Amino acid sequence: MMNHMTDDSEFLSRLINFGLSEKEAQLYFYLLKYGPKTSSMLAKPLKTYREDVYRTLTNLVDMDMVEPSLESPTVYTAVDLDVALDVVLKKRESELREMERQKQELQEILKQQQFRPADEIIKVKVCRTVKEYIAHLISDLSALEKKFLFVMPGQLLFVAARFGVNEAVKKFIERGGCMRGICDVTYPLIELVQELLDIGVDMRHFSQYRGIYFLVYDTLRVECRCYNGDRKYCVNMINTDIKRMSLDERLSGFCTDDATYVNSLISTFELLWKQAIPAAQRIEELLKEEPPQVLNSKAF
């Protein structure tokens, strides 16, 4: 494939079009072109910070496009191009199958509720981009009074903080709201999770979580973007594979006020909460480790 490329920029462009972020494409291509390297050898030629290198390497390892060695310092090797792209394709196919499954579940829910009175009809809203998700979340946070539960991936926590959600969270807690959250707390997330802890969010760490991601809002005081009254409802995210810090980045998810579905998510959250450990404890553990060691866990 590389023999047909006219220059490096064309190859990088094709990688980005295939679904990689610009930084992931550059780092993968550099390892592919110049061979295995340690993380400390990558920051200068790629003109970036070591923290960015750690984060990008973690993503690529998680995508099975880069393999870390077991020795110290860790050496990172680009996986063969054909093998790496096949892995990315299989992941996309898996996401599509999951979206189809979620679609069928929603259709069944709607069928069951088809003849409900107008004020009890289940409502569903689909979010297709980060912009829609952020706008929906900030709007609803301004109307919440009591409880907010979430199980979120690190990528989405970074994006939410970047576009102002943390400020809305702070105001919600200052009004007396209670927010509890679960995520896989890894080294790149230390500062962000500590910020959430400082503003009053009760956070816990669940190691290498690979289940569904969701938010559950409890008790609204005014009419919100989708629903009225004091109903519980959730935002269930199917695809959260965020590649760039952009409002136009694609994100697949839906909102629903179906009581049965929402209550099942609340039960799931409480089960995870019991198994998770306090985020502050996890941060203390991470600070005792060297950053390259964290990357071997293949967790963001």
Image: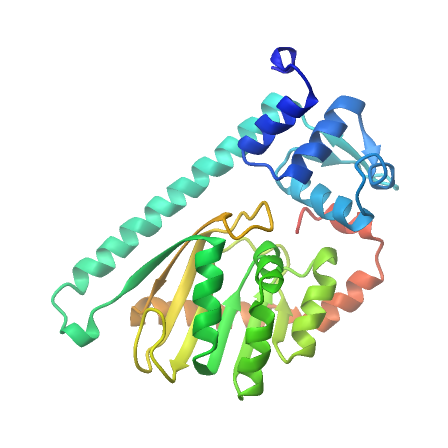
Extreme-bottom residue of the structure: 176
Considering depth in this image, is 232 or 141 the residue closer to the camera?
141
Who's the residue at 63% across and 70% down the image? 204
Question: In the figure, residue 111 lies in which quadrant?
Answer: bottom left
From this view, report whether residue 29 is shown above or below residue 153. Answer: above
**In the rendering, at what x and y percent does residue 47 appear?**
81, 39
Who's the residue at 56% across and 50% down the image? 246
Question: In the figure, residue 126 lies in which quadrant?
Answer: bottom left
From this view, report whether residue 80 is shown above or below residue 117. Answer: above
Who's the residue at 39% across and 82% down the image? 219
From this view, report whether residue 272 is shown above or below residue 40. Answer: below
Q: Can residue 267 be seen in this view?
A: no
**In the rendering, at what x and y percent does residue 17 appear?**
54, 31
**In the rendering, at what x and y percent does residue 121 appear?**
20, 69
Tell whether 9 sits left or right of 182.
right
Considering depth in this image, is 268 or 242 the residue closer to the camera?
242
Tell whether 90 sits left or right of 51.
left
